[in-house]
Image (tube, rainbow, N blue to C red):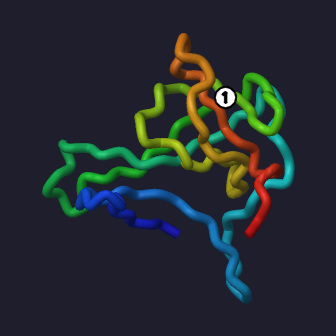
Amino acid sequence: IELFVTDPDGDDELQNDYAIFKFDRVDSPIRLGHYTPQIGESLTCISFIHDPSMLGTPEGDIVRVKYQGQVSRNVFNFFECQMDVVLHAGSSGSPIMNGNEVLGILSGNLSSSDPHDILFQSVSDIEPL
């Protein structure tokens, strides 16, 4: 499900985000993983960026992007990934996936010395509502 959200402070700029909902009698290809990724496992992070060069095109100026990462260590109920690019501000909350399984939610950068090291909260520790 793709969500379009406006800033609660009245800013009219739209922001994209992902959410995963479970509906009765609906079969989704996306699943929540039930394990914490292991060191060395390769994963994909999906996010959105604002691309001014796309303004006025039929696709629009909000672009979905995929980043690749590899788990470098586990830290309590989080895991750290070494990403192939520096993720942009506003990426928090993005899912990190293995195939069609969501394994974590982007939380932030653990180390200011290396912006490629990104911290994800494991979905195996997130309680469903």
Residue reaching furthest left? 56
Check disc 1 and give the amino acid type.
Cys
Secondary structure category for the residue under label 1: strand
Along the line of sight, the residue nearer the viewer: 118 or 127:
127
Q: Residue at x 41, y 36 (%)?
A: 89
Residue reaching furthest top? 113
Where is residue 95? Give x, y as percent: 60, 49
Q: Quadrant of residue 114?
A: top right
Residue 47 in the figure: left or right of residue 61: right
Q: Residue at x 26, y 61 (%)?
A: 10
Residue reaching furthest bottom? 25
In the rendered image, which residue does mark 1 sit on?
81
Where is residue 4? Give x, y as percent: 39, 65
Where is residue 20? Give x, y as percent: 62, 66
Along the line of sight, the residue nearer the viewer: 59 or 71:
71
Q: How many marks?
A: 1
Local crowd at mark 1 within 10 Å, few (<14), some, or many (≥20)? many
Residue 96 in the figure: left or right of residue 92: right
Where is residue 76? Give x, y as percent: 83, 32
Along the line of sight, the residue nearer the viewer: 119 or 116:
119
Q: Residue at x 48, y 42 (%)?
A: 91
Point out the image quarter for the C terminus. Answer: bottom right
Q: Residue at x 69, y 46 (%)?
A: 104
